[in-house]
Structures are given as structure tokens and as C-alpha cells.
Amino acid sequence: MSAQREESDDADVAHDEASFADLGLSDVMMRSLAKVAYETPSPVQAGIIPRALQGVDVLGQARTGTGKTAAFGIPILERLNEPVKDRRPRALVLTPTRELAVQVRDEIDRLASGRKLRSVAVYGGKPIKSQISRLQRGADSVIGTPGRVLDHLSRGTLQLDQLETVVLDEADRMLDIGFRPDIEKILRRCPKRRQTLLLSATVAPPVERLAKRYMHKPEVMDFSPKGKRADTIEQRYFT
Ligand code: AMP
């Protein structure tokens, strides 16, 4: 853990010693990584991937731009492996915005090359019909904003009974927007036996409360760049 904390001082610079080959990934994943030209895991990936592959709940403090999407996307894909017969979602990622939902879906699709898996993004501000038909064709993973995910749940167009992994991406932003009630409703409908991964740029008490309530003994990993924040803040005062 202390090694991880040292790495976190340089959260977005790839760690020299870590390699994807050391993380116990499948051949198909190694080929996908070569295709997207990811040569070395970022510290967030080197920290989260091995623990997530073991099935542990992880609360990772990481900003955007640190490679956090692949840090949860790679373990999800390794677990999904190949489609199962009825193709009900086995992974759900909740995001604060539709832009992020699309971004996460695209990253998961890129990393899923060579597998016959389908991921579907569901978000508000777009007609629900095309999302419904995509879900009906079968989705191994669903990425969506909480409001629209709830909408699909209440229409019966999304089932969560086969879920194995739930990700709360940018949890602090979701709570800031006011998604807590929706997130809680969704989590209460997820199977109890599941893995939960939570990513958040900050871990303030509201995020901690969410983790305490809905995660199982989460391993906390801090990849925030300590002592660097001051670089981006210019302070002046006027008398
Ligand atoms: P994220 O923090 O997940 O939004 O990722 C930020 C950017 O880093 C995205 O454009 C990713 O495609 C890219 N990226 C993620 N992991 C790696 C890696 N191991 N090597 C190179 N680029 C990466």
C-alpha cells in the first residue's frame, strides 16, 4: 500500500516498473491493449486492476485523465470474457453525464476488440426508443446516467438480476448533481453478491457514506496527486 501511495504522487505518469504482463491479464486483453497502444499501465491501473480481478470492492480516489476508465474497464471485460446465452447485463457503470457515459462505452468497446461482447450506453436527452431496442438485442454491459437507468428499470427494459459488477464513476460529481436518491434506488435493485468499484476525484463524507452503505469492505486506494494541487491555484489578495 505504501508503494501505491508513493506512485500516487505522480498519478498520471506511467509507472516505469509496472507492466500489463505482470497484471495477470488474458491473451485476448493483451492483444487489445497492443491494438490501442497502451504500453504501460498508469498507476491507477497498476493499483486497481489486480485487486479488482480478485473480486475485491475498491474505492479509488482518482481524477479524470489518470486512466481510471480502463482501470475498471479491463477487470469488467476479463470477467465478462465472452457473451452468455441470455445476454442480460453483467456489468453496470453509472456516470454523472451522458458525455461520460458515451466516453466510457467507447473505451470499453475499444478494449473489447476480439470479443463478441456488446455494451450499451443509456442516458437522458435522447429518445429512449433506440436505447430500448439496443437493450433488447442484448447487452453484456450497460453504461448510463442514473436517471435514465432508473427509467429503463421502471419500464422493465433493463434487468439487473445478472449483474456481477457495478461501477460508480465520478461518484462525487454524481452526488453533487443530486443523483443520490437515484443511485440508492438502483443499488438496492442490484444483486447483493456483486463487486462494487467506486471512483471519485474527492472522497468527502457523502462519498464515504455511500461506500459504507453499499460496498463490501472496500479497499481504499488514493491516487490523488498530493502536494501538487497548489501548482494550479494562483493566490492573490488585495488590501
Ligand atoms: P481516463 O482517465 O480513463 O479518461 O483516460 C485518459 C486518457 O488516457 C484516455 O484517452 C485513454 O485512452 C488514455 N489511456 C488510458 N490508459 C492508458 C495507458 N495505459 N497508456 C496510454 N494511454 C492510456
Image (cartoon, helix red, strand yellow):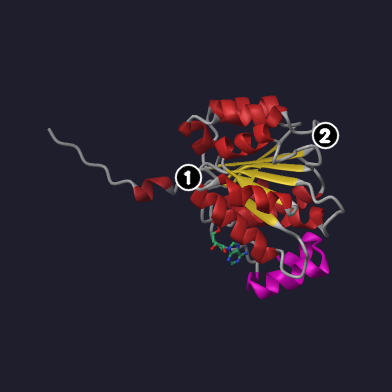
Q: Is residue 27 magenta?
A: yes
- Name the element at disc 1: loop
Considering the image in quadrants, where does the C terminus appear?
top left
Few, some or many C-alpha atoms within 10 Å of disc 2 (few <14, some 14-19, many ≥20)? few
Q: Amino acid at mark 2?
A: Arg
Tell me if residue 103 is in the magenta stretch. no
The response on whether ligand 1 sits within 8 Å of label 1 is no
Vertical arrangement, residue 24 with respect to residue 87, above or below: below
Compared with 175, 164 (above or below) is below
Quarter of the image for residue 185 reads top right
Name the residue at the left extreme: 239
Pointer 1 and pointer 2: residues touching (CB < 8 Å)? no
Between residue 118 and residue 154, name the one nearer to us.
154
The nearer-to-camera label among 1 and 2 is: 1
Region in magenta: 19-39
Amino acid type, label 1: Gly
Where disc 2 sits, the SS reads loop
Can the viewer see residue 118 in this picture?
yes
Residue drawn where x is 67% and y is 75% of the image: 35
- Where residue 116 sits in the image (x, y, percent)? 78, 64
Which residue in the structure is indicated by mark 2? 193
Q: Position of residue 32 (x, y in %)?
A: 71, 70
Residue 204 location, x and y as percent?
A: 52, 30
In space, the residues marked 1 and 2 are separated at their CA atoms by: 32 Å
Q: Which residue is mark 1?
A: 125
Give the side of residue 164 with respect to residue 167, left or right: right
Image quarter (top left, top right, bottom left or bottom right) of the N terminus:
top right
Q: Quadrant of residue 212?
A: top right
The residue lying toward the viewer, choosing from 64 and 95, is 95
Nearer-the-camera pick, 224 or 239: 224
Is 68 left, or right, of 81 in this rendering?
Answer: left
